[in-house]
Image (cartoon, grey):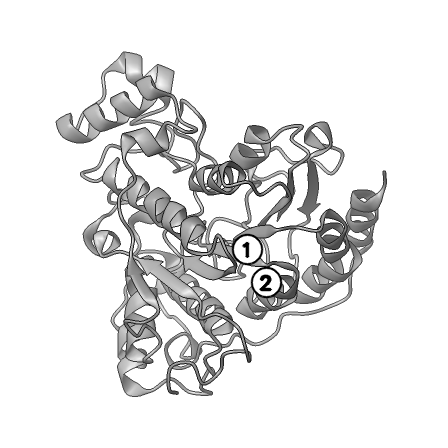
Amino acid sequence: MPWGAGFRQGAAAPVFIGSEIYRHSRYGRGHPLAVPRVSTMMDLCRALGWLPDALYREAPAATAEALARFHDADYLAALLRAEARQSVPEEDQKRYGLGVAGNPVYPEMFRRPATGAGGVLLASALIRAGGAAFVPGGGTHHGRRARASGFCFLNDPVLGILAWLDAGLSRIVYLDIDAHHGDGVQDAFHGDARVLTLSVHEAGRWPRTGEAADRAGGSARNFPVPKGFHDAEMRHLLEAAILPLIEAHRPEAVFLQCGADALEEDPLSHLALSNNAHVAVVRAVRPLAPRLLVTGGGGYNPWSVARCWTRVWAELAGFAVPERLPPAAEAVLRGLSFAHRLGRDPPDFWFTTLRDKPRSGDVRPAIVAVAKQALEA
């Protein structure tokens, strides 16, 4: 499909911000983030002709000075030392969470998250006057001001939102559909009426925060959902609560963290979404967002993540998704391997199509209740 053939009339072309740093950077053997994600979906998009030069920008690595807009300078110095030395003294392990608890020492442990943050900061600047951007390497929503947390060494959503606030925007929505609560972002804007944080996540899953009653001083609404959460239930949350809350906030910008670990095939959650749900969220939110910045996030099955984020980009950019992938795109997916039981005998549709079959069912009372509670004053 020719570039731009699917764009809405009068809409500015979206921008895709990627990087080659993800191609050979791994958190280490056995880590959930050892799988290729951003590089695979970029290869898939290129095989489909969906990353023309006119839409693509290379993500710069954010400087320590730019990162210090949110992160503590001593923490950033420790992160830089850890990358340079490839080791972390016990004191820094305890103080900063480096080299422990899923936040490993690896060769690009500063440069990789700094590239995600740099991509988000570039995106926030490029769409400051309006438009849409996708930064699949972003979405590290657990990072703390002075501590690594939940595989996240930095918090690029916080940095991107702060950049918008610094530019004079005063009504921003952060919507997080990762399987894990967006705790780092919620806490960063606790009580800040300018930023409404909305998080849909598996109830009781790490970091075990984000109860429905948690309003973060009035600046948050949380949607903890039960195991088996499916497409029809996501649609109910969207229509009954999320979209009304966004509309009421009248956002000048929306930041959508589009983690793919709520998909049924993901090994780190018990949710059951298809990638149709992610596309539906993007489609529903976009008309309410004069500025829309979409990032990746969680996602630990290389096939499901790449197919999902490629569909998200197609939705943003207006590309028509083929019923069956052309040979070059199919070859990208067939070239993957996954050292997990889910990778032993993958179904053929993981190779041949981007669209999942819908995963639906009855909307359970728990979903109705959490939507209703979110709207209560």
The answer to whether 44 is drawn above or below residue 122 in the figure is below
Q: Which residue is mark 2?
A: 273
Residue 92 picture location, percent across and down: 29, 16
**Callout 2: few (<14), some (14-19), or many (20+) C-alpha neighbours within 10 Å?**
many
Residue 257 picture location, percent across and down: 52, 51
Disc 2 to disc 1, C-alpha distance? 6 Å
Q: Which residue is mark 1?
A: 262
Mark 2 and 1 residues: CB-CB less than 8 Å, in contact? yes
Q: Residue at x 44, y 54 (%)?
A: 296
Work out whether residue 202 can be spotted: no
Instruction: Locate the N terminus and report the quarter of the image it occupies.
Output: bottom left
Give 265 or 284, whichever is nearer the viewer.
284
Q: Earlier in the sequence, mark 2 or mark 1?
A: 1
Q: Tell me the amino acid under the disc marked 2.
A: Leu
Q: Tell me the amino acid under the disc marked 1.
A: Ala
Which quarter of the figure has residue 30?
A: top left
Q: Residue at x 78, y 44 (%)?
A: 374
